[in-house]
Image: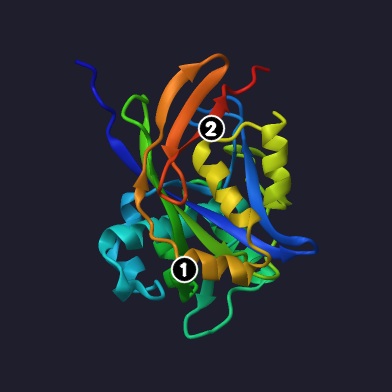
Amino acid sequence: MTKVATLESAATVMLVRDGAAGVEVFMLGRHDDLEVAPQALVFPGGKVDADDAAPGLAERSAGAAAWDDEERGFRIAAIRESFEECGLLLARRRGAKDLLTGAEAETLGRRYLEDGHHSLDLGTLVRAEDLELATDLLQPCSRWVTPASRPRRFDAIIYLAPAPAGQRARHDGGEASRSFWAEPARVLTEVEAGQHHMLVPTRRSLRFLSRQASVAEAQAAAAKIEVKALSPDLQRADGGFIARIENEAGDGIEEFFIADPPTR
């Protein structure tokens, strides 16, 4: 009997800003030698660590009383991963209304991410700098469970959050080889043309963003979403997979072709 891989919790965040032609989202291109989603375009994110659900972080998370330990852990992981992977820190000085400035985020990045970007002790950071995590700004948009047939499986929530004004986004050089801001519709067009490798959750999320004219409109639309776990049905096809998934209206099935990562 085939053993089904254990689910690993993960959190991803669509960091958005208003651009000249509408909403722009920050994207990362993953290295081609990674085990998970090599060469794929993704949003910042990663696995939920045990420390993300620590009581000390709950006390420093805005709105934490409204969520259970699991949801709070997902949200804190999304903030931690965003800081590690692209230098954007969704946090405030405790008692302040505004998010950290660009200069403050840069200073904290040099101070706490100087040893490789992936060993951040978030609890130490928030206590030492007297911060409150802006977990209240994260809006869940979708939840995806990797099919049982895959060798590594994730239970992942995709959040929406406004990028902190004044902070500079960049890729960390670890898991990501490139990064950029882009209009969702343009990226989708390039994916359809075969210019990028992208998984179904990212494509569906970009499609949602492509219908929004501003960050405020995207936030209002996200607030109306009833999030439920989705798991695509994958079938092997020439050059990749066919993924079948319930459509956004909930009244039918749509198909996506997922090309295998290009060989280099």
Q: How many marks?
A: 2
**Residue at (34% x, 24% y) in the render:** 149
Of the pair 174 and 190, the residue shown nearer to us:
190
Element assignment for label 1: helix
Instruction: Kindly tell me whether residue 212 is visible in this rendering.
Output: yes
Identity of the amino acid at label 1? Ala
**Residue at (44% x, 62% y) in the render:** 225
* Up-down relation of residue 98 to residue 216 (above or below): below
Identity of the amino acid at label 2? Phe
Q: Earlier in the sequence, mark 1 or mark 2?
A: 1
Give the residue at mark 1. 223
Residue 214: give x, y in percent of width and height: 67, 67
Q: Residues within 10 Å of mark 1 (few under 14, many from 20)?
A: some
* Up-down relation of residue 8 to residue 31 (above or below): below
Q: Describe residue 25's horizontal placement relative to residue 134 as left or right.
A: right
Q: In the rendering, which numbered label is found on residue 256?
A: 2
Of the pair 123 and 111, the residue shown nearer to us:
123
* Up-down relation of residue 208 to residue 123 (above or below): above
Of the pair 37 and 213, the residue shown nearer to us:
213
Residue 9: give x, y in percent of width and height: 35, 45
Residue 18: give x, y in percent of width and height: 71, 66
Instruction: Kindly tell me whether residue 113 is visible in this rendering.
Output: no
For the N terminus, give its image quadrant. top left
